[in-house]
Amino acid sequence: MGRRLAARDEILDRSEERLGPYPFPDAIGAGLCCFEFHKRPISAANVVSVEETTSDCTIPGVVFTTKKGFQICADPEVDWVKEIIKIKKLNVEITDRNVPDSCCIRYQSDPIPIRVITGYKVSDHLCTKPAVIFFLRNSSEVCGDPELDWVQRCMRRIDQMEYNIMMQTSNSSSQS
């Protein structure tokens, strides 16, 4: 079974090279457009980022970037694509290039264990809903209400851990 999966991944790698996005020549900046979509589902575990095509494109699409660096165009209306978006951008709205980078549409209600959080950022001030976006070990993002105690505790804890790492690095380099 392992060989079959490896062979399937190799075939996907080759097909991904052909179904990538194309630069949109008239777009301001480096916009990408899709003109055909990858048909077969891919594993969310192989996807490292999700990006919506620009509003200038004739066909709306989603561009998945894989661990191997391939970019794959996918139809945002297909169920398997929606599922990957949900996994990778949990509670974070995919936005186009003319609006803030990431905005939250709803908050995580239950506290997130600090051990699964790798970092955070505060949502853009242009977003309609203030939020803290936590980055998790499984590469997903979860939104928290900045007014809640558990969100503030997680932020303080992460800040303290990053400070401790910075101080350890600083101390070890000054002792050398």
Image (cartoon, rainbow, N blue to C red):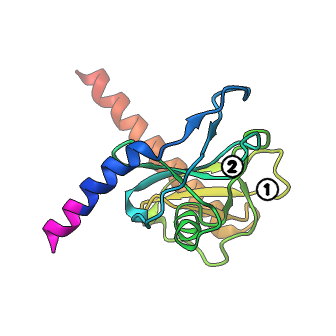
Residue 57 visible here: yes
Residue 161 point in image, percent of width and height? 45, 49
Which residue, as the protein is rendered here, is positioned at the far front?
36
Question: Which residue appears at 48% of the width and 63% of the height?
Answer: 39
Tag 2 residue: 122
User: In percent of the image, x 31 and y 47: which residue is there?
Assistant: 14
Which is nearer the N-term, disc 1 or disc 2? 2
Are the residues flagged by discs 1 and 2 in contact, CB closer than 8 Å? yes
Q: Is residue 63 above or below residue 110?
A: above
Task: In the rendered structure, find residue 130 and report the number of the disc placed on it.
Answer: 1
Three-letter code for the amino acid on which mark 2 is drawn:
Val
Q: Which residues are magenta?
A: 1-7
Percent x, y of residue 28: 74, 26
**Residue flagged by tag 1: what amino acid is it?**
Pro
Q: Nearer the viewer, residue 1 or 99?
A: 1
> Residue 176: which quarter of the image?
top left
Is 52 above or below relative to 76?
A: above
